[in-house]
Image (spheres, rainbow, N blue to C red):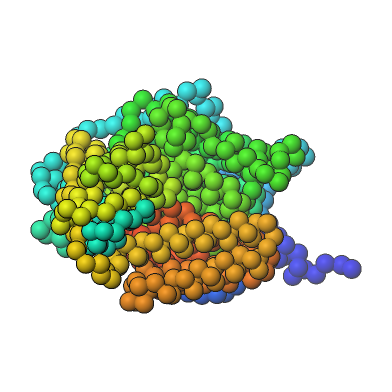
């Protein structure tokens, strides 16, 4: 059948490739200041929409915006604004400088529709940035410059066994000691803001009963040790409204060295990678000039995109450029990504007070744990994490890895294990469009660390007392041989963060006294704002001794924390039962726990934590009703819950960052502030733009 003229015209139009260079009346591009910033991607739709409508609306927004908005920098594209426009054969348009920067790193596919291009824009290799320009994205260059006119037709693709496109072509050094030097002049920590009692850790103790009979003895008498970190600067400043209006990155705090290890395997192509780029843009924007960032991208191999670099305006633009250049292809080599992330931390010449790694993946490691030679029944997830950053490692590096399982196909067991081994948390991002919120909650905490290397020492006071047990979750604890002194290693605390530990002792009868001294609690830690070691000692924990035995009401505070530990234990038992294939037994475990909780004193009093625990256990039950439900989301949901309770730290769980969620017990004010900023910026892409680099 012959082809009509109209069809031939449409075919020719579809293959047309053009570069349009707008001019003003003088033949020169007009200056533009408002669009000098860089946002990564359009904001995602509201999490309130259904998954199917969410993706359709997001795709539609991408398509609509491609005609008048550059999908790389989010600035508008219109004739006469002084910037060249590149239209590819797939009909999507971009600023010339944006797409040229993207393709020079090997990207030959459309960032929007993933179509492979036969012709790509290239900047002249001989052209150099003018000496008076600091901008990485050269939007102010004159458009008659020869560097703007080069377009190369790609040769036909050659067949190759390799399915990995290198991110950058520059070789990596053998030693990652090329981290950017710290600039002490940029320090935003002021000792004058810290000479206050509110800079001290607060210790509060609650005995199980306020008074007991003199003739009674207990083998397992419980004392709750409650500690709270110093308040954030915004919480102790007279002009609180003024401080709260500032980004967290501009308030006095300890600087961070952050390495993000990002999955760019083939399964991340399309919307997932677009949302990841947007989320990383948010992270970059909220880091301060004293913070340093490095990015590792991994698929079948891993590549360091740039060394640890201070997030000055110039550093942010360079980081955004690297993130924009990411493409998705290849397998999933988590171990190699973490190895390079750990190497950056080990080899750095200088160190910021806080250091952390963020790992995101949407799949299973196909090279180390789940390779054909590995034990499929009992995978050794320790192989994924270098020994140097284990929380109990011999090197003393101890860098926490906060892991994020992206979507429903990731390996939740491996991500939870990596976090647990390193001292980090595991978050389950079930709804992919909330990845930015999950990152925001995490960095809201990391950017507010006020206490480092915290150790709690618990001493028995009465000569016949001894410690029976320390319930500290995932925090290491130890009791010395005579069982009269115990230690809990807590590590770092975010501003306003709280911890609760249950200490069990044997309480002897005491017929000769009206009161028995039980414990003394001492906290030793490094205050990162004063840069000094501090010691806080609690008041003695005492219990009254009555002559006549009476029925004393149990402490609500102690009962509440017992319920928290009971729920955490039930989730761990249910998960183990489900892994053995007995989903009915797992649901029964959770149901029994809910029944026990409902009969406790704190639950009957309507305690908010107990209400949240019951809602969480019910949610886990619903995700274990079938094998399919458990595999899709149940395992990840329960593991992120176990991670949250064991570290007493907020994690993302399904919709747990949503304002209507009950599972928000551990969020700090800094986390809430950063999360609120993320949710506000979703509706305002222009807010992602950065100032000009100086």
- Which image quarter holds the N terminus? bottom right
* Residue 72 visible, this orientation: no
Task: Please tell me which residue lies in front, 362 or 685.
Answer: 362
Question: Would you place residue 94 above or below residue 612 in this image?
Answer: above
- Residue at 44% across, 37% down: 391
* Residue 587 visible, this orientation: yes
Give percent across and percent down for residue 584.
66, 68
Q: Is residue 95 left or right of residue 414?
A: left
Give percent across and percent down for residue 417.
54, 46
- Which image quarter holds the C terminus? top left
Task: Please tell me which residue lies in front, 675 or 594.
Answer: 594
Give percent across and percent down for residue 467.
34, 45
Question: Would you place residue 565 above or below residue 177 in this image?
Answer: below
- Residue at 43% across, 75% down: 598
- Residue at 72% across, 65% down: 9
Total marks drawn?
0
Q: Is residue 261 left or right of residue 129?
A: right
């Amino acid at each position: 059948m012959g082809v009509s003229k109209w069809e031939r015209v449409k075919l020719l139009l579809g293959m047309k490739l053009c570069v349009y260079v707008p001019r003003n009346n003088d033949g020169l591009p007009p200056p533009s200041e408002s669009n000098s910033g860089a946002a990564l991607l359009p904001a995602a739709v509201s999490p309130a929409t259904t998954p199917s409508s969410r993706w359709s609306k997001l795709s539609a927004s991408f398509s609509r915006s491609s005609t008048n908005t550059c999908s790389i920098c989010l600035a508008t594209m219109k004739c006469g604004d002084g910037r060249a426009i590149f239209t590819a054969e797939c009909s999507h348009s971009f600023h010339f400088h944006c797409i040229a920067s993207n393709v020079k790193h090997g990207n030959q596919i459309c960032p929007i529709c993933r179509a492979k291009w036969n012709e790509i824009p290239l900047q002249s290799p001989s052209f150099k940035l003018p000496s008076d320009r600091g901008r990485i994205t050269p939007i102010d260059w004159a458009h008659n410059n020869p560097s703007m006119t080069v377009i190369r037709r790609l040769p036909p693709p050659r067949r190759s066994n390799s399915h990995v496109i290198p991110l950058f072509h520059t070789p990596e050094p053998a030693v990652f000691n090329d981290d950017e030097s710290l600039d002490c002049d940029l320090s935003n920590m002021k000792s004058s803001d810290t000479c206050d009692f509110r800079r001290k850790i607060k210790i509060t103790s609650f005995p199980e009963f306020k008074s007991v009979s003199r003739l009674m003895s207990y083998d397992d008498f419980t004392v709750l040790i409650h500690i709270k970190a110093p308040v954030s600067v915004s919480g102790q400043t007279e002009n609180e409204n003024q401080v709260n209006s500032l980004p967290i990155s501009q308030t006095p705090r300890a600087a961070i060295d952050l390495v993000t290890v990002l999955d760019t395997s083939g399964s991340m192509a399309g919307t997932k990678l677009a949302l990841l780029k947007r989320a990383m843009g948010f992270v970059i924007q909220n880091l301060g000039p004293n913070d340093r960032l490095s990015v590792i991208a991994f698929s079948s191999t891993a590549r360091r995109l740039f060394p640890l670099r201070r997030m000055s305006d110039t550093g942010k633009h360079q980081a955004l450029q690297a993130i924009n250049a990411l493409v998705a292809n290849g397998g999933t080599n988590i171990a190699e990504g973490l190895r390079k992330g750990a190497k950056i931390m080990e080899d750095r010449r200088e160190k910021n007070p806080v250091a952390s790694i963020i790992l995101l993946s949407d799949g299973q490691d196909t090279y180390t744990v789940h390779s054909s030679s590995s034990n499929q029944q009992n995978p050794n997830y320790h192989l994924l994490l270098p020994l140097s950053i284990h929380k109990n490692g011999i090197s003393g590096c101890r860098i926490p890895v906060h892991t994020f399982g992206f979507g429903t196909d990731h390996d939740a067991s491996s991500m939870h294990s990596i976090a647990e081994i390193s001292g980090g948390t595991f978050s389950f991002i079930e709804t992919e469009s909330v990845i930015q919120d999950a990152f925001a909650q995490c960095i809201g905490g990391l950017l507010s660390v006020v206490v480092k290397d915290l150790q709690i020492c618990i001493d028995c006071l009465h000569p016949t007392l001894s410690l029976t047990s320390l319930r500290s979750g995932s925090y290491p604890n130890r009791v010395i041989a005579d069982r009269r002194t115990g230690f809990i290693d807590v590590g770092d605390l975010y501003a306003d963060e709280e911890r609760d530990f249950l200490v069990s002792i044997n309480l002897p009868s005491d017929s000769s006294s009206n009161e028995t001294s039980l414990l003394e609690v001492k906290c030793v830690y490094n205050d990162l704002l004063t840069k000094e070691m501090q010691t806080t000692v609690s008041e003695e924990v005492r219990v009254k001794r009555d002559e006549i035995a009476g029925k004393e009401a149990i402490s609500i505070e102690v009962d509440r924390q017992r319920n928290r530990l009971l729920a955490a234990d039930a989730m761990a038992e249910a998960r183990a039962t489900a892994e053995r294939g007995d989903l009915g037994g797992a649901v029964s475990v959770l149901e029994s726990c809910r029944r026990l909780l409902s009969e406790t004193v704190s639950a009957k009093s309507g305690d908010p934590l107990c209400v949240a625990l019951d809602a969480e256990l019910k949610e886990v039950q619903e995700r274990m009703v079938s094998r399919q439900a458990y595999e899709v989301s149940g395992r990840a949901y329960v593991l992120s819950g176990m991670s949250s309770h064991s570290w007493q730290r907020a994690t993302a769980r399904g919709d747990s960052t949503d304002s209507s969620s009950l599972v928000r017990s551990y969020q700090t004010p800094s986390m809430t502030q950063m999360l609120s900023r993320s949710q506000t910026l979703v509706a305002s892409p222009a807010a992602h733009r950065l100032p000009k680099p100086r």
